Image (cartoon, rainbow, N blue to C red):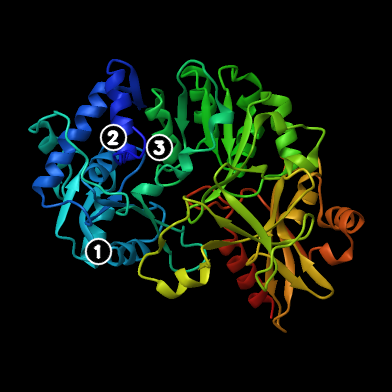
Amino acid sequence: MSGEIQEFRTYVEDTLDALGQWPEREALVHEGRRISAGELRGLVYRMARVLLDQGLGRGRTVTLLSGNLPEAIAVRYAANLIGCTVNHLYNKLSVEVQAAIVRDVETAVLIVDPRLAQRAMDLVALVPVRTVLVLGEAKVGADLVELAAEQSAEPMAALARPEDIVSIRHTGGTTGHPKGICSTFGQAAAFRGGLEEAEGAREPERQLVCTTLAHAAGHLADHTLAEGGAVVLLEDFDAAEVLAAIEHERITRLFVLPPLLYQLLDHPDAARTDTTALRALIYGGCQASPARLADALRRLGPVLFQFYGQNEAGGISTLATADHDPERPDRLRSAGKVLPGVEVEVRDPDGHALPVGELGEICVRSGGVMQGYWKQPELTAEVLRGGWLHTGDLGRFDEDGYLTVVDRLKDMIIVMGGHVYTTELEDVLNTHPQVLQSAVFGVPDADRMEQVHAVVLAAPGSTLDERELREMVRQERGAMYEPARITFTDALPLTDAGKPDKKLLRSQAEDAADRLI
């Protein structure tokens, strides 16, 4: 009927409907446990009733401290079903930072992985929480799974409204105190769009989760379950375990950040692992090296699919599988084409849109843009101006409409004679056959002038030295890009999400410089 108002449905209802459509199908796999779609659906409804009994509902915040447990997925759905906001902590943050977040988001209930019971006790010692529930038996709190077993698994209506906050996702804390990014239930589908080009009409996906559910892998797991697929959960990224799971579980879909993709390619087991079931290796979260992507294409075939987005912005653009051409490093360097329903402008510092080819800040307008930062109106107003989100990313469009992200504004290094874009220098370093990965950042000297530093992960048995890399950079990009210092390492430190931890690397470099003074 024309003009009829469509009833609002949450992402949870769509997912639960899909689980109910195929109740016997395998939905979750974790450490030998195989959970059917019907079992997962029933657990969500049971847990939702426990949370209602605890006095939770619309507008209350549930903080989740958990690894990649099946019950963690179920309780997030349960909390969102009754209209709660879910705040999923990164496990590798310090207890002090976690406590500050728990307090800041006004946590009503802390829900804990039993394996993290000691951290939970440390947390509540720093910030009192009214109720602690545990996803199993532990020495702290009540057993939520046991309580849920006494409840009905009958379906129940969702309580959330479009304007309610579905999640508060914090930045990883690598640039100071984490910022709470608020998204509404009405925006919850933003990350689930844009993946269609990585798929097609075929058998249900089998997704491997090998990074934290608190990050992009959790969004993708929602997408997989809602379309009738199965999710295999690993607790953390280990290249050997991931490769084994890809083969033994016949994984068709995988999300990794670029540094983790490189670890997969470089592992000795990679050459003998059967990856033929893999249909979509989705990557994003930080810049990828064109040289390493070309290597992945040669080894894995046409399965790569890039998703460019931000927690603040939702999905922005994708580089489709068909656009991954190992003979086109310029195309591999790009973030692809802007998603339908998303507007992107590249702007100068005065806010004027720039023409094709010119470098400026990437600004986004779409239904996926965040509501704002939790309790930070000034920062929200700084980032959200005139209906546009200012991403803090520097980029440019080419004549064919492909968007290339050049650097983060805060990572750009100001040197004598101009600017050094860290990802461009990393691209140059990564082309050397003995370089597996690199991270570039600026470090102020005694005169507070920024100096270019590079940390390089070289291939085993490498004979590479600093002089050779300096010469290569000088020839490729000129003296301005030549690092003041190149350090070799056995492993690059990564954040919880899997990005190179440049804050830590910068701090280590500054400490080393101070010791030389």
Q: What is the C-alpha distance between the residues marked 1 and 2?
A: 26 Å
Disc number lying in front (2 or 3): 2
Q: Which residue is mark 3?
A: 235
> Picture coordinates of residue 192 (x, y %)?
46, 38
Residue type pointed to by label 3? Glu
Which residue in the structure is indicated by mark 1? 106
Give the quarter of the image for residue 51: top left
Left or right: 385 as drawn, with respect to 475:
left
Residue 307 is tagged as none
> What type is the residue that disc 2 sits on?
Glu
From this view, report whether residue 366 is shown above or below residue 361.
above
Q: Position of residue 481 (x, y in %)?
A: 82, 63
* For residue 389, above or below residue 273: below
Residue 302, picture quadrant: top right
Residue type at mark 1?
Glu
Residue found at the far front of this picture: 2
Residue at horizontal 46 percent and vertical 27 percent from the top = 207
Q: Secondary structure at mark 1?
A: loop
Q: Are marks 1 and 2 in contact (CB under 8 Å)?
A: no
Q: Secondary structure at mark 2?
A: helix
Looking at the image, residue 100 lies above or below residue 265: below
- The numbered disc on residue 13 is 2
Which residue is depicted at the point 79% across and 40% down?
329
Q: Residue furthest bottom?
A: 447
Q: Quadrant of residue 114?
A: top left
**Among all residues in the image, which is located at the extreme right?**
475
Separation (CA) of disc 1 from disc 3: 28 Å
